[in-house]
Image (spheres, grey):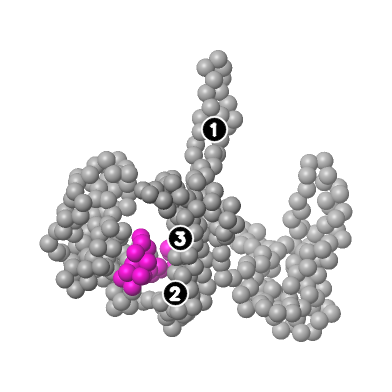
Amino acid sequence: MQGRERPENRPDIVVRVFKMKLSELLDDLIKRKVFGCVTSYIYVIEFQKRGLPHCHILLTLDSSSKIRTKDDIDKFVSAELPNINVNRRLFEIVTKCMVHGPCGIINPNAPCMKDGECSKQFPKAFREETEENVNGYPVYKRRCIEPVRVGKHYIDNRWIVPYNPWLSKKYNAHINVEVCASVKSVKYLYKYVYKGHDAASITLKNDDIVNHDEILNFLDGRYVSAPEAMWRLSEFSMSDKSHTVIRLAVHLPEQQAIFFKEGQENEAVERASIKDTTLTAWFKLNLIDEEAHEYYYADIPQYYVFDKPSTKWQKRQRGGQQVIGRMSVVSVQDSERFYLRMLLL
């Protein structure tokens, strides 16, 4: 940077530094196994309204590395201020990057305030020890300490966002680390990383027209900041995952899904009559390839590749370890398909 330039003046540098830190962080998590052996991962890049990039990473650990007990949680995650006399640098990083707000009575105009309360449930309650599972997440240890002045306010452990001391000290950045303690929270986590880009609701008004069409007046507007534009111009990936998910059809005879354009229904039916789905192609594969008899329908993508032009399963030449076959969910009320799916499993 030249002179007194600020981050908002150089989105190119912001993006490249973030990319370098992200690559190193992924190496720490996956290759160097900071939290243990990672069996799968997914991450998504997002850009805040102020323009700064951030990343949501979801890790699935091997059964031998699962963080289950409160001792395991305390080993990897802290929600307390470090001792300034023992580790001054970590104390400075945590007070700079890992303090929420403050909000509430101390600062009622904070962005997180909704209807007079903090939407993130801060300040948290003091707690002498960690509790493993409360509504899908641990309740971290937050011992009562003497308040410390940070900026304009005095704060204590109730305002600290959970973090990993080693990662915070290495990257000198805001890295929120949470432990998923129940299967109930897995669905929310996957939904969160796939929730999509930021959007703004735009209203178009015309005073000359009395009858407004709300659907036409409200548009889903993209908000693209300068760093996001630089990220896309640099052709950096917006997301990545360790495994490829292959969708497998589950349907009754002559009841496969057909996609068509209005007015081209007959042509679509004719195309579907001569092409196989992943299910009908699997039945035909079992007629000609005895080796396929060893695998269930959901496991077949690990050993065979579905060639869309020919609509045939072909033996996989390499890979397959990072492939997951996923059958569509079928309601028990659709009994014939439901029991077909059970048989396929």
Please report the bounds of the magenta region as a residue range: 165-187
Helix, strand or loop status at disc 2:
helix
Please identify the quadrant where the C terminus is shown. Answer: bottom right
- Going from N to C along the chain, the mark reached first, 2 or 3, is 3
Residue at 65% x, 59% y is 334
Q: Give the side of residue 254 with respect to residue 121, left or right.
A: right
Circles 2 and 3: CB atoms closer than 8 Å: no
Mark 2 is surrounded, within 10 Å at the Cα level, by few (under 14), some (14 to 19) or many (20 or more) other residues, namely some
Q: Residue 218's mark?
A: 1
Name the residue at the front extreme.
3
Mark 3 is surrounded, within 10 Å at the Cα level, by few (under 14), some (14 to 19) or many (20 or more) other residues, namely few
337 above or below 39?
A: above
Residue 25, horizontal then vertical, whole percent: 44, 69
Mark 1 is surrounded, within 10 Å at the Cα level, by few (under 14), some (14 to 19) or many (20 or more) other residues, namely some
Q: Residue 252's mark?
A: none
How far apart are labels 2 and 1 at the CA level? Answer: 44 Å
Could you tell me if residue 69 is visible in this image? no
Membership of 173 in magenta stretch: yes
Q: Residue 28's mark?
A: 2
Q: Mark 3 points at which residue?
A: 17
Q: Between 199 and 281, which is closer to the camera in this rendering?
A: 199
Residue at 86% x, 49% y is 267
